[in-house]
Image (cartoon, grey):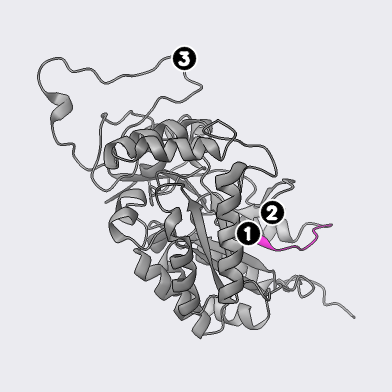
Amino acid sequence: MFLYCSDLGPTIDAMLQDPPFGYRKGRGALGNPAVRYDRYRNEAFDDGWGGLDAERAPLRTTVARDTSRTVIARNDSPDIGFDRSINPYRGCEHGCIYCYARPSHAYLGLSPGQDFETRLLAKPDAAKLLTEELRRPGYRCRPIAMGTNTDPYQPVERRLEITRSILEVLSEHHHPVTITTKSALVLRDFDILGPMAERRLVRVDISVTTLDRTLARRMEPRAATPSRRLEAIRLLNEVGIPCGVMAAPMIPGLNDAELEAILEAAVEAGARSAAYILVRLPLEVAELFQEWLESHYPDRAGRVLSLIRQCREGRISDATFGRRMRGTGHYAELLGRRFQVACKRLGLNSTRDELDSRQFRLPPRAGDQLSLL
């Protein structure tokens, strides 16, 4: 269910009313912790009338306009393979409980909990802003990454088509792009991605965290089922759009035992490349994940958290460059070794589909002087 605030109106004022406390069906987070920058905190309190035990009404998804004046985000992180990215949306309705992007909602005055899943900001002018940025003097083309923070193909994209409009601009400019998603909605854009793939301008990675549909439904309540994601890998590769698998995140004691099975299923679907990331639980995500784990898997919560700490030098999270993606310690090293052995056995990552940045060009606009060269 969606509520569009003032047709993507200019402010988020309508979104700042705190929702009731407690679990909501179809949502990942069990609560809505206070924003870390707020002076005051709200706590659920049972006044004797049984309100905390009552079944909660489903939370509606609201979408407001993001008025950012630029759309390309830059980074100089030494342990990721891109220096620029585009995120059409802030917040993500998929509701993945482990999502490391949740704390970014606090910058908007919204909670990283249920607000992150239900109170979204969209960038309807993204295609226009992107066109302006690509035409700036001195722009140097390198692949743009999409899906690095929130999913560009989350459910709201089906109606708003902001990601599609961005891809149209990139295709027109012959600009390379990488896409990471856990949604089968990417199949909708075959007509754009296919011709881009022929020019070596696009690569897709589908995130598959588990083959267990029950675990997926609890952990990623509004994302595509595992079978749909594998089918997306198969269909993309069949039409010549290179698509690999992201076995991410791997959560020790919860889904990491499935690593080899996920890679095998992806290879059967046609994947030729693979990657994995150890679960990251920065800031509020640690509390949200622990609460979720103790609610859904109380029998293994202690072990899972203990294993995560073993991979993070005794901490629940470690943001240090070079360690945050893979972790440290014996358990993390074993996970990495398992991944390497499985990839070698399955023939994954033996070749890499390199994207071509040399084709970038500015399409002519009405009134432009024609070039003599």
Q: Judging from the image, what secondary structure is the residue with disc 3 in?
A: loop
For residue 145, the mark is 1
Q: Judging from the image, what secondary structure is the residue with disc 1 in?
A: strand
Magenta residue span: 137-145
What is the spatial separation of the Cα atoms under label 2 and label 3, in whole angstroms?
Answer: 34 Å
What is the spatial separation of the Cα atoms under label 3 and label 1, in whole angstroms?
Answer: 36 Å
In this rendered view, identify the residue nearer to me: 173 or 85: 85
| Dominant SS in magenta | loop
Q: Is residue 26 magenta?
A: no
The residue that label 3 is drawn on is 39
- Quarter-wise, where is residue 127 in the image? bottom right
- Quarter-wise, where is residue 243 in the image? bottom right
The residue that label 2 is drawn on is 84
In the image, is 244 to the left or to the right of 212? right
Q: What residue type is disc 3 on?
A: Arg
Q: Is residue 150 above or below residue 289?
A: below
Which quadrant holds the C terminus? bottom right
Q: Judging from the image, what secondary structure is the residue with disc 2 in?
A: strand
Q: Is residue 280 above or below residue 163?
A: above
